[in-house]
Image: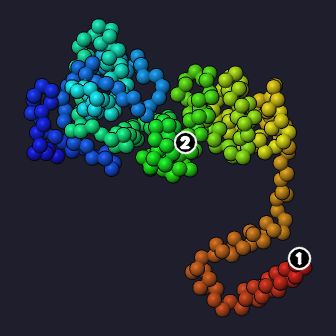
Amino acid sequence: MNSPSQPKDRDNVVVNLQERRLDRTILRTYRTKADVDAIVPNEKQPRLGPKIDEELQRQIEANGGLFEPLLVEPHPDLPGKYRIIDGDRRWTNSRALVEQGKEEFRQLPIEVTDRTLSDEDRLRAWIYIHRQRKEWDAKEKEMVAYRLVDLMGRASAANILGVTVRDLDKLVDIFELSEKFTSLRDPSAAITWAREMMGVSKKLLTPSIVEAVVKKVNDKRITNSKELRKLRTILPDPVARANFLSEGGDLDSAMLRLAPVETKPKGGLSDDLAAAVEAMRSVPWTTLQDLKGDAELLKKIEAAEELLRSLKKAIT
């Protein structure tokens, strides 16, 4: 909604503030444009990893610029400049195009808050925006949890993410494990590998097991993250586990050394009783009503009761 307040941007153009609700954070913003050099990245940006993306640069060029404005705030220490709340990758790649001599991408659309945000509000806003995007489930969650703990500590990080400290620790563990997978063709897939690993009982994931898995993945002896699910069967078996840990062992060779699973013989008295009980339970209520007072059936039930009492006495 429009506010009666009408602050002026750097070009002295009167604009209306609009209210934008991002979860528990309410921002009052206005839209304008700014030179790429008037925008400064946030040093406490939760996202880690490379930001230069040639595919994103091609999209910016094809669209003739950015469609979605950067969300920025007045910089607290640099008068006349803005600090990025969300849009660091868009800014980085727009700037890369300008550095290539493509001056038409110098002016960027921005959405400016009416104040400089607190660290907590800035992070809450960024996290809310990224939760709406597909990449949050793909790879962002664990990385952001790790970064927030580094920036603010476990309690504050859990509060901002809206999770328990225990759940936060799981996310951090996954991210730290993902950093060990260094030879994947797609580095962003490391989170998927780490998630599969953490699906194994924590009691079974000893340091030696983790080290062996990471080495075999980095040596490309394990090439599909879903294959790690075999560890749930291998690790409880001492012979199979020892084979996997050996220099020449791998998932397939370890599976061949699993002890045969003992199977209970089908049928027998227990299964017969279970089948009889299930058959009686499945009799419709209307049928039971029709059988009321059936003398022949009552005799059979009494005989069955007597037989069951004798059976129970025999095996007690």
Asked whether residue 24 appears in the rendered view, the answer is: yes
Q: Residues within 10 Å of mark 2 (few under 14, many from 20)?
A: many
The percent coordinates of residue 249 (x first, y second) are 80, 28
Quarter of the image where one finds residue 267: bottom right
Name which residue lies at 67% across and 23% down: 218
For the residues labelled 1 and 2, the Cα–Cα distance comes to: 52 Å
Left or right of 148? Residue 280 is right
| Residue at the spot of label 2 | 171
Name which residue lies at 51% across and 45% down: 154
Asked whether residue 128 appears in the rendered view, the answer is: no
Front-most of residues 316 and 310: 316
- CB under 8 Å between discs 1 and 2: no
Front-most of residues 97 and 281: 97
The percent coordinates of residue 107 (x first, y second) are 22, 19
Rendered position, 109 above or below 160: above
Residue at the limit of the structure toward the front, as seen here: 77
Front-most of residues 109 and 258: 109
Name which residue lies at 52% across and 28% down: 188
Depth-wise, is mark 1 or mark 2 nearer the camera?
2
Name which residue lies at 62% across and 83% down: 288
| Residue at the spot of label 1 | 315
The percent coordinates of residue 257 (x first, y second) are 84, 37
